Amino acid sequence: MELATAVGLIGAVAYLAGYALIQMRVLSIDDGRYAALNVLGGVALIYSLLWNFNLGSFLTQVAWLIFTVVGYLHSRHKRRKSMVPPTIQAPANDEILPPTEVAA
């Protein structure tokens, strides 16, 4: 078996494993391991296609890889944003609040 074929098979197994793990609820869509399996699958299949080129498959793999990276970065940004503690904000109408009385 040629190296390009073996690498392509590894990529296909990575894609299918990621999909199966999502369907079985072992991984969530936001899990970095799912993104890693998709990236591995995409890179391996693109490598394989460089030796046995097929334009349709190549474009599909490149798009899948881009969607995976963008989705992972978006998910990571969303998680970081939700971890930021809320800030105290001034009243929206710039109203001056009355002073509080101090007990003597």
Image (cartoon, rainbow, N blue to C red):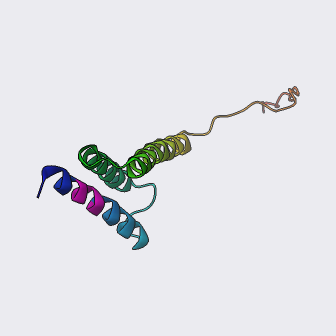
49 sits to left or right of 28: left
Q: Is residue 45 above or below residue 101?
A: below
Please state the horizontal and vertical placement of residue 72, each as a whole percent of the image.
45, 46
Q: Which one is in front, 87 or 25?
A: 25
Quadrant in which the N terminus is drawn: bottom left
| Residue 44 placement (x, y as % from top left) | 26, 49
The structure residue drawn at horizontal position 41% and vertical position 44%, both measured from the top left corner, is 62
| Relative to 65, residue 87 above or below | above
Q: Is residue 26 visible?
A: no
Q: Is residue 85 visible?
A: yes
Dividing the image into 4 quarters, which one contains the C terminus? top right
Viewer-nearest residue: 80 or 50 = 50
Residue lying at 29% horizontally and 60% vertically, measured from the top left: 12
Report which quarter residue 91 is drawn in.
top right
Q: Position of residue 28 (x, y in %)?
A: 43, 62
Q: Nearer the viewer, residue 91 or 9?
A: 9
Q: Residue at x 48, y 42 (%)?
A: 70
Residue 3 percent location from the top left of the image: 13, 51
Magenta stretch bounds: 8-13
Question: Residue at left 40%, top 55%?
Answer: 31
Q: Quadrant of residue 69?
A: top left
Q: Could you say which is closer to the camera, residue 79 or residue 88?
A: 79
Q: Does the magenta stretch mainly form a helix, a strand or a loop?
A: helix
In the displayed orientation, state which residue is furthest to the left.
1
Q: Is residue 78 above or below residue 12?
A: above
Q: Is residue 43 above or below residue 94?
A: below
Where is residue 85, by image quadrant? top right
Q: How many marks on residues?
A: 0
Query: On the rendered structure, is 11 left or right of 80?
Result: left
Say whether residue 31 is magenta: no
